[in-house]
Image (spheres, coloured by chain):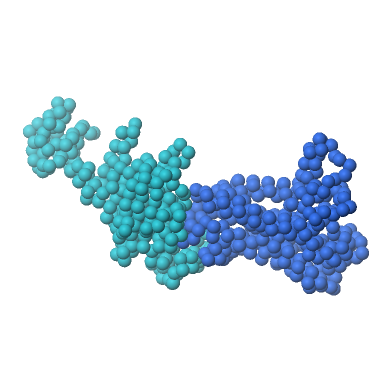
């Protein structure tokens, strides 16, 4: 059974199409990253999974239940860290967690949960005085109540410092090791790359890619990029470099040649370039998934424009 | 049964509202001052025969009728609209519950907060009055407190219901204040205005019964009528008659059933169920 199954999911707000006909399956037990720039439709999709908003068309099935008609059943097995939430300023951290335990009919010790997210020392302070990062930890603790089968985390590292983001990833992995499916959204590729089994990239309400991290790397011909300083760089040199074997693309960038290579070694490519124009210096850049993400989301914009 | 848990959490949260306790403070101070005034010069406050505990109760009705709507607005207007505006509703609805349960829990929690605050005020005010008068009518006092707490619950329902219809606290404020102005401040005038228009922009010589009935439709009139209906002996003694309600309203001699004070209980019930239905329908259908 799939943990999350979206079929033709569409949500319009007036004229704006926030989510445009998604089909997406998240398998049980995987860590799934939902990646896209701000405003791409990530939160809208998550809000539909949690029945905060209702889809214009299509269906969302979560843990085998329809998200709209059986929301309570969905949420009884789901831990949620929503986006744009607000804590109850006048209640303490402990009261928040106790409330979640009571609502989920769990049997955890609030102290232990707060310990796990490392805010136990602030348990009896009012949450209104918490920092953004502490609130994020508090709501994560609430999400972990009741050993959920699915964790839905909307931008989980918002407000966390690098240490906090690492701890968040550790908790995600620990939960996943217990068999929990994790679905989380982010606009930062780096975070997704670090923990995810599979990734969906969305832009302007549309899915532009769904694949494993490795699959994405391969699929988007991300070889390596060389920056080469040559003597007498001009258009003629550029044209000849472009026609070289194994050169995917080449351009003049800041007085250097930027050359993407594919299928040949860097050494061979440099040699070939050296025969066109003598190489004075070079550097190598491994194409990161960040570039890939930018490329995916920009390509779509260019197509649309 | 998550609504009970929601209600409990909401009570814990809202009972810490400073505005509520400022209001309760004002209510206590007002009721002490006015109780003292009533006991000292009862003829000025509609009890020419001298101050009695029953008379004090009916005198307090007027104070409660003003205090409860204002306190309900202060305590309840943000109950759901505020949670939606801030986003804390997402924390709440991420948990295994339904919007209906959240709505019910909010109504119960806020009603409990209001009832708690009002009870403090009533115990102090009526206790002070009983001590000054040297008499206490336990049964009448109990009936009065129960009806007053029901009225409080009704008003909490109305304002939480209003709050459930919108995700904006400024709109919730406007709606709640609008409700207060129309149904509490202007309601004596509204039926007369309607009559004036219906009769071709002039007043008839006798006021038809329906005007009186309409004037009873406001929650606090219904509350007053209910007290009269349940404590008829005291009402007679205190000279309290809902028919005296409107300014210059002259009720026709024959009293049709809908002009009897019992209708107040029905109206109060309606004020409980209509906001529940409207609020629930709007809240469950909304995109948060």
What letter labels the chain drawn in blue?
A: B
Q: Is residue A35 visible?
A: no
The percent position of residue A50, horizontal first and vertical second, equals: 43, 54
Residue lying at 52% horizontally and 59% vertically, measured from the top left: A88
- Determine if residue B256 is in view: yes
User: Which chain is in cyan here?
Assistant: A
Front-most of residues B16 and B187: B187
Q: B244 left or right of B25? A: right
Quadrant that contains the C terminus of chain A: top left
Asked which quadrant contains residue B19, the reply is bottom right
Compared to residue B141, the image places residue A274 above or below, namely above
Among the 4 quarters of the image, the one containing residue B39: bottom right
In x, y percent, where is residue A119?
43, 65
Please identify the residue farthest to the right as the structure is shown: B49
Q: Answer left or right for A135 relative to A276.
A: right
Please give the name of the residue rendered at 12% of the width and 38% of the height, measured from the top-left corner: A246
Indicate the position of residue A160 as horizontal and vertical percent values: 39, 56
């Amino acid at each position: 059974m799939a943990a999350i199954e979206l079929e033709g999911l569409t949500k319009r707000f007036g004229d704006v199409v926030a989510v445009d006909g998604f089909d997406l399956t998240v398998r049980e037990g995987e860590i799934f990253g939902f990646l896209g720039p701000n405003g791409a439709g990530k939160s809208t999709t998550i809000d539909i999974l949690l029945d905060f908003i209702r889809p214009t068309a299509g269906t969302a099935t979560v843990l085998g239940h329809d998200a709209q008609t059986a929301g309570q059943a969905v949420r009884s097995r789901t831990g949620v860290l929503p986006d744009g939430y607000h804590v109850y300023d006048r209640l303490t951290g402990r009261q928040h967690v106790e409330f979640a335990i009571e609502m989920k009919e769990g049997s955890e010790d609030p102290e232990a949960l707060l310990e796990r997210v490392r805010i136990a020392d602030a348990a009896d302070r009012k949450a209104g005085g918490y920092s953004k990062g502490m609130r994020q930890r508090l709501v994560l603790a609430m999400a972990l109540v009741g050993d959920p089968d699915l964790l839905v985390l909307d931008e989980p590292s918002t407000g966390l410092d690098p240490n906090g983001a690492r701890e968040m990833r550790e908790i995600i992995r620990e939960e996943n090791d217990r068999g929990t499916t994790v679905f989380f959204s982010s606009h930062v590729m780096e975070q997704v790359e670090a923990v995810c089994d599979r990734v969906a990239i969305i832009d302007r309400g549309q899915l532009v890619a769904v694949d494993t991290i490795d699959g994405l790397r391969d699929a988007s011909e991300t070889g390596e990029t060389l920056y080469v300083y040559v003597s007498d760089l001009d258009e003629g040199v550029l044209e000849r470099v472009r026609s070289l074997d194994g050169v995917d693309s080449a351009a003049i960038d800041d007085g250097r040649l930027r050359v993407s290579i594919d299928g040949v070694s860097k050494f061979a490519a440099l040699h070939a370039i050296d025969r066109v124009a003598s190489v004075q210096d070079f550097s190598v850049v491994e194409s990161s998934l960040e570039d890939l993400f930018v490329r995916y989301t920009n390509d779509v914009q260019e197509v649309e424009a | 049964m998550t609504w009970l848990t929601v209600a409990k959490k909401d009570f814990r949260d809202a009972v810490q509202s400073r505005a509520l306790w400022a209001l309760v403070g004002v209510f206590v101070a007002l009721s002490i001052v006015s109780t003292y005034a009533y006991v000292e010069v009862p003829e000025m406050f509609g009890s020419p025969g001298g101050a009695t505990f029953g008379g004090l109760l009916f005198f307090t009705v007027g104070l409660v009728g003003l205090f409860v709507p204002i306190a309900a607005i202060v305590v309840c207007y943000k109950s759901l609209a505020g949670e939606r505006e801030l986003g804390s509703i997402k924390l709440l609805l991420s948990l295994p519950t339904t919007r209906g349960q959240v709505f019910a829990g909010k109504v119960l929690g806020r009603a409990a907060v209001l009832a708690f605050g009002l009870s403090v005020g009533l115990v102090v005010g009526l206790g002070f009055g009983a001590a000054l008068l040297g008499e206490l009518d336990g049964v009448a006092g109990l009936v009065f407190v129960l009806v007053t707490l029901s009225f409080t619950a009704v008003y909490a329902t109305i304002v939480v219901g209003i709050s459930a219809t919108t995700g904006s606290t400024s709109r919730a404020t406007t709606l709640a204040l609008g409700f207060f102005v129309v149904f509490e401040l202007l309601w004596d005038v509204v039926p007369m205005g309607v009559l004036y228009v219906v009769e071709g922009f002039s007043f008839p010589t006798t006021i038809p019964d329906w005007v009186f009935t309409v004037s009873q439709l406001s929650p606090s009139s219904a509350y007053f009528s209910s007290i009269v209906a349940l404590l008829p002996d005291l009402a007679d003694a205190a000279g309290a008659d809902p028919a005296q309600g409107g300014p210059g309203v002259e009720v026709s001699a024959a009293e049709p059933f809908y002009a009897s004070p019992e209708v107040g209980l029905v109206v109060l019930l309606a004020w409980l169920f209509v906001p529940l239905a409207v609020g629930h329908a709007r809240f469950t259908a909304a995109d948060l």
